[in-house]
């Protein structure tokens, strides 16, 4: 395909730039008003305490919907939730292919079956080192080390220029359960100067000096901790970290222990790993029903819940609520993970409960039981040296990570460092430049089974209810202003003390307001409604110091 003088290569982050999670980006090529687009990743982030009832947050694909006829495909770098978790919710409407590796395809299929999702997507398998074409784009997956199998960077080539989109990566010469980052291929890309090259790169650890330790180092630590333990050993880790689970299985086997798994996501992902041939030569994994039949010093338990999820296995064990598994004083519990920001309180609560039971809790503060899947500053410098990019765009991070990465790139001599946030348009070639807030972006909430905008969700009301409780008053009046039924009260979420009941205070307030009003005014339902509403809020506020949410229903009969 010949290069047109008006052709531009642009990048539009729709999620994941200025935040951790919810990664989604679009690459456009062609003249300004007739570009073709491919999308890289389609992930989620998770609702926290500030979003009651919201399970998942997704990027709003409104910009892509406006250009739906020119959107050609979605390419997935790997199958972590923040990169692929929204595919089955957002992509079916586009009816365009999804390119991903066999492991990611199997993860998508398992997610669809497990969550009972009706919609499906057309999946095409891609493999590292086997380029494929989509419209004006040629795409090549390049193997990179990360904390999940088959993670890939993407070399995206056009007639005018190229982009190396790293996805999540690190330099690990001795990963477990996956091939190392393909350094030789990255070096060859840098040697090719036929067209300019942009680097769109992971910024997660741009504040950390040095290089990330290897998964093999963690495996060595786990082997020692399991071998030395006098009683049971339990380990919790990210269910998707197949390499870490393999290290635990090998360590247990070396210590003469059997491995029991507990947790639905762990069973699902390890089942996929087995189908993909990743567990060959390893001893069998037992279900939790076998837990009670294995001697205390001959077992290793792998369980879910490393992020403090209330319904996950380790949380239930810590509360003493698991149907078949318990841990006792002297047992060893290893958190082979780190608490994602926002989850610290829940994780600490589990650890404290275990410690109170006399269980030895080991975290990454006590030894090398976890490593990140993202590059530190020295790894980033090495990548710059191999690729020699003309343009750097830091992505995958909060503002502090992006700024640190941008400065690192400048210090390394990269000529064009384009800082961006969600909704900006970055022209990569020609004449690199960032155009702020060029496209509409935002969030969608998964509220139960309903996908909605923040404005459409009921989150604001739930916040009010969580702060002020709710008072409901219902009564019937006739045309003469006489109360013929009620008042009936429902009070939720307000304090009740032995000294005085707020319910009684509200009931007396309602009766007092009704008695004080002439029949004619009581017959006006709007006047009565307003008087009751204001009176209840004021009286409760005087006693409690907070104004409750009040709903008044005056029925005319």
Image (cartoon, grey):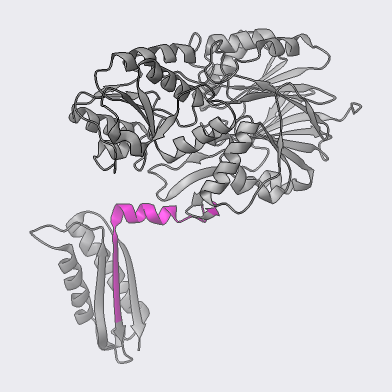
Quarter of the C terminus within the rendering: bottom left
Above or below: residue 171 compared with residue 347: above
Q: Is residue 300 above or below residue 124?
A: above
- Would residue 305 be counted in the magenta stretch? no
Of all residues shown, which one is farthest toward the bottom? 480
Q: Residue at x 10, y 61 (%)?
A: 500
Q: Is residue 94 left or right of residue 313?
A: right
Query: What is the span of residues highlighted in magenta in the rendered image?
Result: 451-475
Q: Is residue 360 positioned above or below 547 on the image?
A: above
Residue 18 shows in the view? no
Q: Is 469 a magenta residue?
A: yes
The quarter of the picture where the N terminus appears is top right
Q: Using the image as rendered, state which of residue 9 and residue 521 is in the foreground.
A: 9
Residue 262 x %, y %? 38, 36
Q: Is residue 186 shown left or right of residue 470?
A: right
Locate residue 234 relative to residue 385 in the image: left or right.
left
In depth, the one of 5 and 109 nearer the eye is: 109
Give the vertical position of 98 relative to 413 (above or below): below
The picture places residue 362, in percent across and down from the top left corner, at: 30, 20
Question: How many marks overall?
Answer: 0
């Amino acid at each position: 395909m010949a290069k047109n003088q008006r052709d531009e290569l642009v990048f539009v982050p729709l999620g994941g730039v200025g935040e951790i999670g919810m990664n989604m980006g679009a690459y456009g090529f062609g003249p300004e008003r007739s570009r073709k687009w491919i999308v890289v990743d389609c992930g989620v982030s998770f609702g926290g305490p500030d979003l009651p009832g919201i399970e998942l947050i997704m990027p709003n694909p409104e910009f892509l919907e406006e250009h739906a006829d020119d959107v050609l495909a979605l390419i997935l770098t790997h199958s972590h939730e923040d990169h692929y978790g929204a595919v089955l919710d957002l992509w079916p409407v586009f009816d365009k292919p999804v390119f991903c590796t066999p492991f990611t395809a199997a993860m998508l299929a398992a997610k669809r079956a497990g969550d009972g999702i009706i919609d499906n997507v057309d999946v095409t398998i891609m493999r590292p080192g086997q380029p494929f074409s989509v419209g004006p784009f040629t795409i090549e997956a390049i193997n990179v080390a990360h904390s999940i199998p088959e993670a890939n960077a993407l070399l995206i080539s056009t007639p005018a220029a190229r982009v190396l989109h790293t996805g999540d990566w690190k330099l690990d010469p001795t990963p477990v359960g996956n091939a190392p980052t393909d350094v030789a291929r990255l070096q060859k890309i840098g040697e090719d100067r036929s067209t300019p090259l942009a680097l769109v790169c992971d910024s997660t650890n741009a504040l950390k000096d040095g290089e990330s330790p290897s998964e093999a180092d963690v495996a060595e630590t786990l082997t020692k901790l399991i071998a030395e333990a006098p009683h049971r050993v339990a380990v919790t880790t990210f269910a998707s970290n197949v390499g870490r689970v393999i290290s635990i299985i090998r360590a247990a086997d070396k210590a003469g222990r059997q491995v029991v798994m507990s947790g639905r996501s762990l069973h699902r992902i390890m089942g996929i790993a087995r189908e993909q041939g990743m567990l060959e030569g390893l001893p069998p994994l037992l279900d939790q029903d076998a837990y009670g039949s294995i001697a205390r010093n001959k077992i290793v338990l792998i369980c879910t819940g490393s992020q403090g999820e209330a319904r996950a296995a380790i949380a239930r064990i810590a509360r003493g609520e698991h149907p078949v598994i318990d841990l006792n004083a002297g047992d060893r519990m290893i958190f082979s993970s780190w608490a994602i920001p926002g989850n610290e309180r829940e994780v600490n609560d589990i650890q404290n409960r275990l410690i109170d039971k006399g269980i030895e809790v080991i975290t990454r503060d006590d030894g090398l039981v976890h490593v990140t899947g993202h590059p530190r500053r020295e790894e980033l410098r090495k990548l710059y040296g191999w690729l020699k990019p003309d343009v750097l765009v830091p992505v995958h991070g909060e503002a502090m990570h992006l700024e640190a990465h941008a400065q690192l790139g400048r210090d390394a001599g990269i000529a064009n460092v384009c800082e961006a946030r969600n909704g900006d348009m970055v022209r990569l070639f020609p004449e690199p430049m960032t155009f702020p807030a060029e496209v509409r972006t935002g969030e969608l909430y998964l509220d139960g089974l309903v996908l909605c905008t923040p404005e459409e969700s009921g989150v604001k009301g739930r916040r009010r209810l969580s702060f002020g409780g709710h008072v409901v008053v219902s009564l019937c009046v006739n045309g003469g202003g006489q109360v013929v039924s009620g008042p009936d009260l429902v009070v939720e979420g307000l304090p009740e003390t032995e000294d005085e009941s707020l319910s009684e205070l509200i009931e007396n307030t309602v009766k007092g307001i009704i008695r004080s009003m002439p029949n004619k005014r009581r017959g006006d339902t709007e006047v009565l409604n307003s008087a009751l509403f204001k009176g209840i809020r004021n009286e409760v506020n005087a006693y409690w110091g907070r104004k409750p949410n009040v709903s008044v229903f005056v029925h005319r009969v």
